[in-house]
Image (cartoon, rainbow, N blue to C red):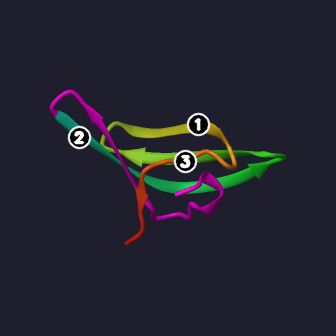
Amino acid sequence: MKIHELQPGDLVTEQHGADTIAFEVVAIKQMGRRFAVTFHSALGLASANYAGDAWIRATRA
């Protein structure tokens, strides 16, 4: 899914060795051509900035 298509509630998973960490999209805000995405996981809240046309592996419930 492209970053600009993300919506709150979408789930992103990331593989770290044998562990899989699930992140839920909490908020997404456009900043020019980039997007600030806030995620929630068992590790807490985190934010990242992405180009709007970047791809990320996400699922929608």
Query: Is 44 contained in the magenta span?
Result: no
Left or right: residue 19 compared with residue 7:
left
Mark 2 and mark 1: Cα distance apart in space: 19 Å
Residue 20 numbered mark, or none: 2
Quadrant in the rendering for residue 36: top right
- Label 3 sits on a secondary structure element that is loop
Residue sitting at x 52%, y 58%: 1
Residue sitting at x 42%, y 50%: 57
Residue 33 sits above or below residue 4 on the image? above
Tell me the quadrant of the picture where the C terminus can be found. bottom left
Q: Amino acid at mark 2?
A: Thr
Quadrant in the rendering for residue 43: top left
Count neighbours of disc 2 (C-alpha within 10 A) and say few if under 14, some if 14 to 19, many if 20 or more.
Answer: few
3 or 2: tag closer to the N-terminus: 2
Residue marked by disc 1: 48
Q: Position of residue 5 (x, y in %)?
A: 61, 62
Q: Which residues are magenta?
A: 1-18
